[in-house]
Image (cartoon, rainbow, N blue to C red):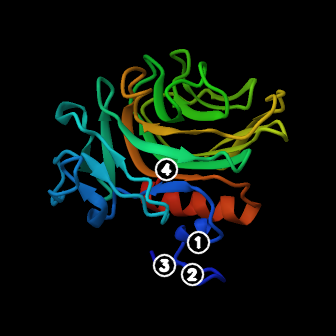
Amino acid sequence: MSILLLDDGLPFPRSLFASGEQGIWLDPSDFSTLFQDSAGTTPVTAVGQPVGKILDKSGRGNHATQSTGASRPTLQQDSNGLYYLSFDGTDDGMATPSIDFTGTDKVTVWAGVRKLSDAAIGMIVELSASAGANNGVFYLAAAASAGANYQLLSKGTVLAAATLSGIAAPITNVLTGICAISGDLCTARVNGVATSVATDQGTGNYGNYPLYIGRRNNASLPFNGRIYQLIVRGAASNAGQIAATEAWCNSKTRAY
């Protein structure tokens, strides 16, 4: 796939962060961003190796790490030749340092994933250690309440949740979450098909918390599946940006 350059001259999706937007972009297909250890001293050179650190390509420096060897996802390659992080559904997970989203009450999340089980809820990505215990948070989860679904949650002081039902594992999808606290916007998209709720989300902006990937607080709700791409942008995204980023994620995932 050729590199798309937008008006700002930055390669896409890096251009999503061209105006100083806070966020993260994790790209397991880029070996230069992958390390076997959390210190980032031993590069990943082949599939099957653990990933203890993955560098953030957004330009914001929000790198994700896992210090516990047994809890590191592994780099794998699927039958299409596409690379992904494999999470074992038991104890794998990663986390960033605190990311300061306090300047915005809007966020857009994209993820190319494959979920392998609907037996229990699996946290794909979550801001803060627990959406229930904290305000100014969001998450994207698989198999909420052990169902054949995905769920997007957004919360100022009151939570709203959009559930995409009837999506049984094993399945590969490109997911998008579009959230705005003051606008009471919580729209979840799977392969471009949207489900929205307009529940009152209370007040405030998103918080300054770590971003947990593959497991809640590195302690519970482990995701059993693959993450091909993960992009979180602390801003509203227009229809063109949403569609272009979904297409980018799909080029790395081949969900549809």
Mark 1 lies on residue: 15
Looking at the image, which residue is at 58% across and 47% down?
100
Task: Give the x, y percent position of residue 15.
Answer: 58, 71
For label 3, the crowd category at 10 Å Cα-Cα, with few meaning under 14, some 14 to 19 and many 20 or more, is: few
Residue 20 visible, this angle:
yes
| Residue type, label 1 | Ser
Q: Secondary structure at mark 3?
A: loop
Q: Position of residue 116 (x, y in %)?
A: 38, 31
Q: Which mark is on residue 255?
A: 4
Asked if one can make out residue 174 in the rendered structure from this viewpoint, the answer is: no
- Residue under the point 84% across and 32% down: 198
Q: Earlier in the sequence, mark 3 or mark 4?
A: 3
Q: Position of residue 196 (x, y in %)?
A: 77, 36
Residue denoted by label 2? 5
Q: Earlier in the sequence, mark 3 or mark 1?
A: 3
Count neighbours of disc 1 (C-alpha within 10 A) and say few if under 14, some if 14 to 19, many if 20 or more: many
Amino acid type indicated by mark 2:
Leu
Asked whether the beta carbons under mark 2 and mark 3 sit within 8 Å of each other, the answer is yes
| Badge 1 element | helix
Left of 219 or right of it: where is 201?
right
What is the C-alpha distance between the residues marked 3 and 1? 12 Å
Which disc number belongs to residue 3? 3
CA gap, disc 2 and disc 3: 6 Å
Residue 139's place in the image compared with 240, above or below, is above
Where's the N terminus, which quadrant? bottom left
At a point 32% along the width and 64% down the height, the residue shown is 30
Depth order, front residue of 135/117: 135
Residue at 59 percent of width and 66 percent of height: 17
